[in-house]
Amino acid sequence: MTLFAPTVVVLAGGSGTRFRACGGASHKLDALLAGKPVLQHVLDTVTAAGLPCHLVRPPGGTAGMGDSIALGVSATPNAQGWLILPGDLPLISSGTLRAVAQALQEAPIVVPYYAERRGHPVGFCRDYFAALAALKGDSGAAGLVQAARDQGRVRDLALEDAGITCDVDTPADLRRAATLLKANPPSQA
């Protein structure tokens, strides 16, 4: 029996201009959090989850989240499905990735929530390959998710992981993440 293991597409193609504009000295994904780059925290979590991973970080970046998703999905056409994970969520747990992957076996799209706030990763079954691979611009897959929701094809998954909503866009976000990480390290279970 083959285990269901969708590919985690880690989005790291953005320019990070907001982080620098707010006083950051580097790209937000390269900023250090507890001595390790923000992006490395995310990649380590994906490794701990035991799921396949594809990092989207082309030289020069991409034109937007839609382009990044399309690149990642197009590069993994044989994946069993995809978990779309922005690279600026350093506190997400590996258990969360596995929970979204598991739920994806029962629904075409899975949207995680924490404290009634939508988070990431959003999971997509193989049926969405062509639509994801065709995305462009900065709106990501929000339109696909809304259309699927209108058809009753989305499962909302409540999780107890604040890391799904704790992204790093500014130096203040990085400081908040450092405080949260120190107080409550993410579970790798």
Image (tube, rainbow, N blue to C red):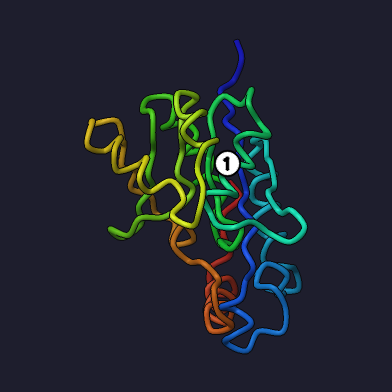
The location of residue 123, given as percent across then percent down, is 46, 38
Furthest residue toward bottom: 23
Residue drawn at point x = 43 percent, y = 30 percent = 104
Q: How many numbered marks appear?
A: 1
The image quarter in which residue 179 lies:
bottom right
The location of residue 176, given as percent across then percent down, is 52, 79
Left or right of residue 30, residue 109 in this image: left
Badge 1 crowding class, 10 Å Cα cut-off, few under 14, some 14 to 19, many 20 or more, is many
The location of residue 29, given as percent across then percent down, is 67, 67
Work out which quarter of the rendered image holds the N terminus and state it.
top right
For label 1, the residue is: 70
Left or right of residue 142, residue 150 in this image: left
- In-front residue for pair 169/174: 169
Residue drawn at point x = 29 percent, y = 30 percent = 153
- In-front residue for pair 147/37: 147
The location of residue 144, given as percent across then percent down, is 37, 40
